[in-house]
Amino acid sequence: MQTLQFSILPEQAVDNSFLKEKIAQEINTNNFEYRIIKRSIDARRKPVKINLTITVYQEGELIDESFIKKEYPNVSHSAPVLIIGFGPAGMFAALKLIELGLKPVIIERGKDVRKRRRDLAAITRDQIINPNSNYCFGEGGAGTFSDGKLYTRSKKRGDVNEILEILVQHGAPKEILVDTHPHIGTNKLPQVVTAIRETILNAGGEIHFETRLEDFIINNNQIEGIVDQHGNKFLANNVILATGHSARDIFYLLDKKKILIENKPFALGVRVEHPQQLIDSIQYHCKTKSEYLPPASYKLVQQVKQRGVFSFCMCPGGIIAPCATSPGEIVTNGWSPSKRNNPYANSGIVVTVEEEDLIPYKKHGALAGLKFQEEVERTTFIAGKNDTTNNIGQIAPAQRLLDFINNKTSFYLPECSYKPGITSAPLHEILPSSIVTRLQEGFKAFGQKMRGYLNEEAIIVAVESRTSSPVKIPREKISLEHPNIKGLYPCGEGAGYAGGIVSAAIDGRRCAEAINS
């Protein structure tokens, strides 16, 4: 076995004959088989190259599978562990518990992926939000219908490849094991999530959909279970709390019961959208993108007045989605299908929220950031000219990027992928001034870094506010239990320990291991 690295043209990277000839020249034999184990794009200069890492085997030694599939024993009669939330953290915690011989009992406020689709369609068609079934709540969590990007920096927290291999085992494309920035796509993720559900059920686990945590059962600082919205009790001495960054009722419940929570930094801003062809021409240094290159993405960051302004969840060939979780608020996010073949590119451009922003909300203690976030989303709802009497509507306020930078109201708006619809609004007056001034300077800096980024067709849509949880639920460093409540394991993005599908999945597995230790 031998590992080779090549930097070649995009059309060469998909040409098996070319690759075989190049490998043969390197190893001086034609008797071999090979597998691409890593692929990335180098677009720093013309021409754009594809970097490949290839493992070469003697002929006949390459096995079909690039990983060993996990086996899941039957745990139907094992000790139960409650998991609150069936997003990435909850799903992967459940799978790990089964591996360890424990029975996961999952409580999910939302619906399964099939039923959930109808509620997402209703948001666009009728502009009505179901508080328990939307882009954030339901089987698979926020990631299921908001893109499925799998890139993470959390490599020190756990085995990223293990997460990717489990996803492939459940139907994700094998390319995610190879690509530097792996992506499944909103059109394919529901099937993967469904397959994971079937694995859990076939192993004897339980999943209770449309079941919402209403209260904790705690005795002498030991958790003993939970109560749902119908008064039903689910009993267990270990509870993994993986409810996601938008489960505000859980934060309010924890605060009400005097269970320690903390204020946590987060970021807030807008979604910016450009024609994908423009981003391709900037990033690939050409007028027309090669058919062998994917739609281009970008990653931008700039320090402005001692705060970070940065791109978040960039979606090439994507759609801006309405991701509110309650009536009377506007929240945007982005997603891409697996082919990333929509005509627009969008990205969150956000500013870190600091203590000075939260001064008017200090009386709310650990919920100060949450209150700030809620107020901005409500203000954005009003700016969208929605029905404020009945809290109905998902029209988002928008502005041409150049007008925003120059403090001008937009008299017309370019086409936009946001389906419920947009309306012109002076976002430079509506959003908090500490956010606006930094966004404006940040956009100017991005225009210097990417010539053409400040474009007549670029549009911003408000508000991008759910980058991460504004609340942290503390836990012990080793045991991962809450410092005051034995058996309670805060987990994933909602608790403040993850920032995406893969890092949440890793954290879910860590919590499962902590329970078993």
Image: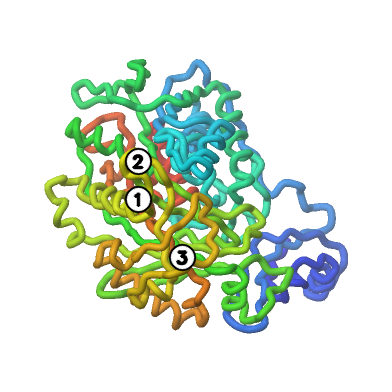
Q: Identify the residue shown where x is 62% and y is 71%.
A: 277
Q: Which residue is mark 3?
A: 272
Quarter of the image where the C terminus is located: top left
Closer to the N terminus: mark 2 or mark 3? Answer: 3
Question: Could you give the CA–CA distance between mark 1 and mark 3, rounded to whole angstroms?
Answer: 18 Å
Q: Please name whichever residue, 408 or 45, is drawn nearer the observer in this view of the structure.
A: 408
The amino acid on which the numbered mark 2 sits, given as a three-letter code, is Asn
Question: Could you give the CA–CA distance between mark 2 and mark 3, rounded to whole angstroms?
Answer: 25 Å
Q: Position of residue 447 (x, y in %)?
A: 45, 79
Q: Please name whichever residue, 239 or 312, is drawn nearer the observer in this view of the structure.
A: 312
The amino acid on which the numbered mark 1 sits, given as a three-letter code, is Phe
Secondary structure state at the residue bearing disc 2: loop
Q: Is residue 441 left or right of residue 311?
A: left
Which quadrant holds residue 246?
Answer: top left
Q: Is residue 142 above or below residue 307?
A: above
Secondary structure state at the residue bearing disc 3: strand
Q: Is residue 5 above or below residue 93?
A: below
Quarter of the image where the N terminus is located: bottom right
Closer to the N terminus: mark 1 or mark 2? Answer: 1
Secondary structure state at the residue bearing disc 1: helix
Q: Assess disc 1: are there few (<14), some (14-19) or many (≥20) residues with their C-alpha within 10 Å of its C-alpha.
A: many
Q: Is residue 469 left or right of residue 454?
A: left
Q: Assess disc 2: are there few (<14), some (14-19) or many (≥20) residues with their C-alpha within 10 Å of its C-alpha.
A: some
Q: Identify the residue shown where x is 32% and y is 51%.
A: 382
Between circles 2 and 3, the one closer to the viewer is 2
Q: Which residue is mark 1?
A: 381
Closer to the N terminus: mark 1 or mark 3? Answer: 3
| Numbered badge on residue 343 | none
Q: Which residue is mark 2?
A: 391
Q: Identify the residue shown where x is 57% and y is 58%.
A: 318
